[in-house]
Image: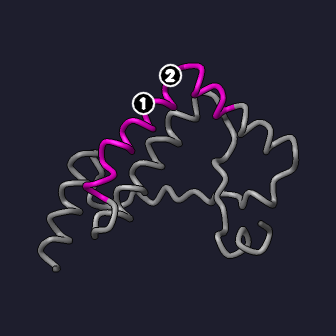
Amino acid sequence: MVCSTLLSLTAVRAAFQIPDQCNGNVQVRPEWYSLGDDLKQAFVDGILCLHESGEYEKFAQRHFEYKDKVHNNDGFGMFHRCFLLDFEKSLKNCYKKKYPTRNIVVCSYVM
C-alpha cells in the first residue's frame, strides 16, 4: 500500500511538475460564505470567462479522462489538489481576487 501511494504521488508530481518542497508562499483562501455579493459575482464572472475562452471545457475533459485513474484510490487527494491549482492559475486570467474555498461542514448546514 505504501509503495503504491508513493508511486501514485510521484506520478502526479511529475505529471503536474510539482516541486518537492514548498517555497513558503502560503495563500489563505477566503470562505465562500464570507464573501460579499460583489465578490461572489466576480468569481462567477471569472468562471463564465473561462467558459468563453474554452479553458473550462479543457479542465472538464481532463477530469473526465483521469476519473477512472484517480478516483477510488490513493491518488485522489493529490490529483485534485493539483487539478484545482491549475484551475486557479487559469482562472487568474479572468478573476484577479483570491480564490475562495468552501467549508464542507458549513455547506452541509446551509444547503
Give the residues in magenta. 46-70
**Viewer-proximal residue among 6 and 61:** 61
Q: Residue at x 87, y 45 (%)?
A: 37
Q: Nearer the viewer, residue 67 or 95?
A: 67
- Taking the spot 71% from the left edge, 40% from the top edge, the residue there is 43
| Residue at x-position 67% and y-position 35% | 96
Which quadrant of the figure has residue 78?
Answer: bottom left
Please tell me how crowded label 2 is: few (under 14), some (14-19), or many (20+) other residues with Cα within 10 Å.
few
Coordinates of residue 85 in the picture (x, y in percent): 46, 48
Tell me which amino acid carries mark 1: Lys
Q: Which corner quadrant holds the N terminus?
A: bottom left
Q: Amino acid at mark 2?
A: Gly
The numbered dot on residue 109 is: none
Q: How is the image coloured?
A: one colour
Q: Main secondary structure of the magenta part?
A: helix
Image quadrant of residue 104? bottom right
The residue indicated by pointer 2 is: 54
Tell me whether circle 1 and circle 2 mark residues in contact (CB < 8 Å): yes
SS category of the residue bearing label 1: helix
